[in-house]
């Protein structure tokens, strides 16, 4: 038995037992993180430098890329360090920082995905009101609200989680500090307060999800009424990447946090955490750039300009 006040560090899950596999995991994580940094960095640079991309959709995409960068930089560097140096330790304050930052960036991402859904809805269903409803000031306010609400939400979660008494050691069954893994160390019944916040979060997420479903029903009805095939294709090309990102993000996060304890296992928990914290930041730039000709052209122009300059 140990008290949370006496815990000065946590032990993260070792990704491998042998030195060869540890180095392999290090290389895989390095490759994924470099892909995420390159992809999101290119999107940020292309949107910032391309004046024709200074529209609400690309403004929110830039914010999404920033949250993706923050998310992967929160979890992967420590996992790479542990694999390279064959250690499992993370300090108590480092663990609290990881919990705060991962919730902050994931919360921001979900808020931005909801706002981007609204952007697509107004663009396709109410095009005449687009500049009125999504002017530069309105977009700035919505983005600021997404970041600020995620900050408050992460602060509330982190403070509540680390105020719980921990009675079951300090070994986390995860490669980064995650709330479900920490709750498993808490004393019996002491997690009910955090469980209440999670239930509130479920209702919040469900409300946003219903809003997205309603919006996309209206969007698809409007798209199918477009007479030209080229017009329908252009409308779908801006919606399908967003739907793919939302599905990947929501399905893994919700399942990771709400799966029944009876089907929980270390390997399943590890796969799910990788799917929602590591994979989306690397895949999102690819998903958005594959279907968006404007973004592809801007990224290509940026890359060719950089190579010609060197």
Image: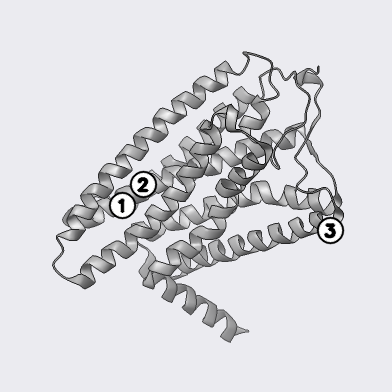
Task: Point out residue 199 in the picture as x, y percentages from the top left corner.
Answer: 47, 24
Q: Is residue 59 left or right of residue 131?
A: right
| Circle number at residue 115 | 2
Q: Is residue 272 left or right of residue 293?
A: right
Task: Report the residue marked by disc 1.
Answer: 119
Q: Residue at x 51, y 56 (%)?
A: 65
| CA gap, disc 2 and disc 3 | 44 Å
How packed mark 2 is, by other alpha carbons closer than 10 Å (few <14, some 14-19, many 20 or more), is many
Q: Earlier in the sequence, mark 3 or mark 1?
A: 3
The residue lying furthest to the front in this view is 262
Q: Is residue 14 visible?
A: yes
Image depth: mark 2 or mark 3 in front = 3
Task: Point out residue 223 in the picture as x, y percentages from the top left corner.
Answer: 20, 59
Colouring scheme, one of rainbow, by chain, secondary structure, one colour: one colour
Quadrant containing the C terminus in the rendered view: bottom right
The residue lying furthest to the bottom in this view is 308
Q: Residue at x 59, y 60 (%)?
A: 36
Task: Report the residue marked by disc 3.
Answer: 20
Q: Earlier in the sequence, mark 2 or mark 3?
A: 3
Instruction: Determine contact: label 3, label 1, CB under 8 Å.
Output: no
């Amino acid at each position: 038995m140990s008290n949370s006040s006496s815990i000065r560090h946590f032990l993260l899950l070792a990704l491998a037992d042998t030195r060869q596999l540890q180095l392999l995991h290090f290389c895989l994580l390095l490759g994924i993180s470099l892909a995420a940094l390159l992809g999101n960095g290119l999107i940020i640079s292309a949107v910032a430098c391309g004046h024709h991309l200074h529209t609400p959709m690309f403004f929110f995409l830039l914010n999404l890329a920033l949250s993706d960068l923050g998310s992967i930089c929160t979890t992967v560097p420590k996992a790479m360090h542990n694999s390279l140096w064959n250690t499992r330790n993370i300090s108590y304050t480092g663990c609290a920082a990881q919990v705060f930052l991962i919730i902050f960036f994931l919360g921001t991402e979900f808020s931005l995905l909801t706002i981007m859904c609204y952007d697509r809805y107004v663009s396709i269903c109410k095009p005449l009101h687009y500049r009125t409803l999504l002017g530069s000031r309105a977009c700035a306010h919505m983005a600021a609200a997404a970041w600020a609400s995620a900050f408050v939400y992460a602060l509330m979660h982190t403070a509540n989680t680390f105020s719980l008494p921990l009675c079951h050691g300090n070994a986390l069954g995860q490669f980064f500090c995650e709330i479900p893994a920490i709750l498993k160390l808490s004393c019996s019944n002491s997690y009910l307060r955090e469980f209440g916040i999670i239930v509130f979060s479920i209702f919040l997420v469900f409300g946003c999800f219903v809003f997205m479903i309603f919006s996309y029903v209206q969007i698809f009805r409007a798209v199918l009424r477009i007479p030209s095939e080229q017009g329908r294709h252009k409308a779908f090309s801006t919606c399908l990447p967003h739907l793919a990102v939302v599905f990947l993000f929501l399905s893994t996060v919700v399942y990771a946090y709400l799966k029944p304890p009876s089907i929980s296992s270390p390997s399943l928990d590890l796969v799910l955490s990788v799917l929602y914290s590591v994979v989306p930041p690397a895949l999102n730039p690819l998903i958005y750039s594959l279907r968006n000709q404007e973004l592809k052209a801007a990224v290509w122009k940026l890359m060719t300009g950089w190579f010609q300059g060197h």
